[in-house]
Image (spheres, rainbow, N blue to C red):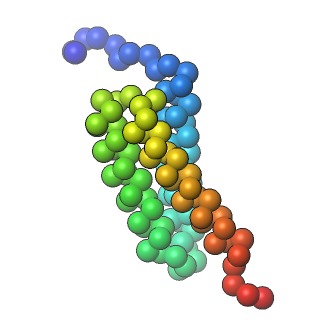
Amino acid sequence: MAGKPPADLSAEQKRWAFFGSTLFLTAVGFLGFAVAKGVMLPFAIGWVVLQAFGYVGSLSRARGDFAHPLFKSQVMIHFVVLGLLVALILKGPPA
């Protein structure tokens, strides 16, 4: 292992790694917004923690393969969570 360069990622692996990292950065950005405004803090903290544990756990079981179905399912779960967050924001409080 020492002295050998890491293997190049395939296009599919790069795509799923990009989707996962984009969702994680979105969650971190929402955490910053939640801390600044003081709203939905448990959701924001929980979402970042769940992503961290979910991605690390799925990547360790998939042996670092970003195109593995386990990692893809983690990305899709967090995409659904993002959709639910958008739905909550769009519904908003009554005017």
Identify the residue at image location x=38%, y=59%.
49
Query: Would you place residue 72 above or below residue 12 in this image?
Result: below
Q: Is residue 39 left or right of residue 47?
A: right
Q: Is residue 30 left or right of residue 54?
A: right
| Residue 19 x, y percent position in the rendering | 55, 40
| Residue 89 x, y percent position in the rendering | 67, 71
Query: Would you place residue 59 above or below residue 93 in this image?
Result: above
**Residue 29 visible in the snapshot:** no
| Residue 72 x, y percent position in the rendering | 47, 39
Between 48 and 61, the one lying in front of the other is 61
- Look at the image and tell me in which quarter the N terminus lies: top left
- Look at the image and tell me in which quarter the C terminus lies: bottom right
Identify the residue at image location x=49%, y=45%.
75
Identify the residue at image location x=60%, y=66%.
85
Q: Is residue 58 left or right of residue 1?
A: right
Image quarter of residue 6: top left
| Residue situated furthest left in the rendering | 2
Query: Would you place residue 25 above or below residue 62 in this image?
Result: below
**Residue 10 visible in the snapshot:** yes
Image quarter of residue 64: top left
Identify the residue at image location x=52%, y=76%.
40
